[in-house]
Amino acid sequence: GQNIDQPTEMTATEGAIVQINCTYQTSGFNGLFWYQQHAGEAPTFLSYNVLDGLEEKGRFSSFLSRSKGYSYLLLKELQMKDSASYLCAVRGSNDYKLSFGAGTTVTVRA
Amino acid sequence: DAMVIQNPRYQVTQFGKPVTLSCSQTLNHNVMYWYQQKSSQAPKLLFHYYDKDFNNEADTPDNFQSRRPNTSFCFLDIRSPGLGDAAMYLCATSRQGKGTEAFFGQGTRLTVV
């Protein structure tokens, strides 16, 4: 089975940096994904890691350590529009299935 | 341009009355998923298709069925909706392979009255 944990809520100030952690225990591993989901909308893809290390995409970066079953999503230069839920998702041994964590709600304050 | 389209966006159904949600895709992806998402919870995988091969999650209730008549379309049938089935239903698609992200439709918000 899959067990994916992330904090429930985080609050940060506009212009600041926030790091969202995700730990996972899965049967097999075929990649970790981060999605952004605004209230009432569908998740949209942000980043993907399958090898250890940091992947950078503009203001967003994602890090993976497979030996620790750990990832984080780093959001830099926060903007008000970044207020959303951030979902960590893992592909396990079956490379079709994608299992999600409960999401971290990030609130950006002026 | 929308690539994964779900209809309708909002569906109200009566307790016990069968309801069908639809999903279509223009990406020609061979994998399609149905997720159920309740407020402040993780999207929960109900089933997925790899081409026509159907894969049911062990804890998906028998009340939920699915059909995929061709690559482009997939349907979620709820035979006897209960109040606990009220949720957002998300359809997603992906290609096969490790590095391929899933693309989501806008979802259907189901209300059971």
Image (tube, grey):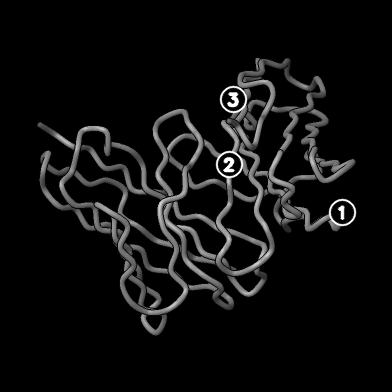
Q: Residues within 10 Å of mark 2 (few under 14, many from 20)?
A: many
- Disc on res. B104: 2
Judging from the image, mark 1 belongs to the subunit labelled B
Q: Secondary structure at mark 3?
A: strand
Q: Are marks 3 and 1 on the same chain?
A: yes
Where's residue A69, x and y in %?
40, 76
Q: Residues within 10 Å of mark 1 (few under 14, many from 20)?
A: some
Q: Residues within 10 Å of mark 3 (few under 14, many from 20)?
A: many
Q: Secondary structure at mark 1?
A: loop
The quadrant of the rendering that contains the N terminus of chain B is: top right
B81 and A44: which one is in front?
A: A44
Using the rendered view, name the quadrant where residue B27 is placed.
top right
Q: Secondary structure at mark 2?
A: strand
Instruction: Kindly identify the amino acid type of the residue bearing the numbered disc 3.
Output: Arg
Residue hosting label 1: B52
Residue hosting label 3: B109
Compare marks 3 and 2 and give the one earlier in the sequence: 2
Q: Are marks 1 and 2 on the same chain?
A: yes
Where's residue B50, x and y in %?
78, 58
Establish if A75 lies above or below B88: below
Instruction: Kindly identify the amino acid type of the residue bearing the numbered disc 1.
Output: Lys
Q: CA distance from mark 3 to mark 1?
A: 26 Å
B66 and B27: which one is in front?
A: B27
- The residue located at (10%, 41%) in the rendering is A13
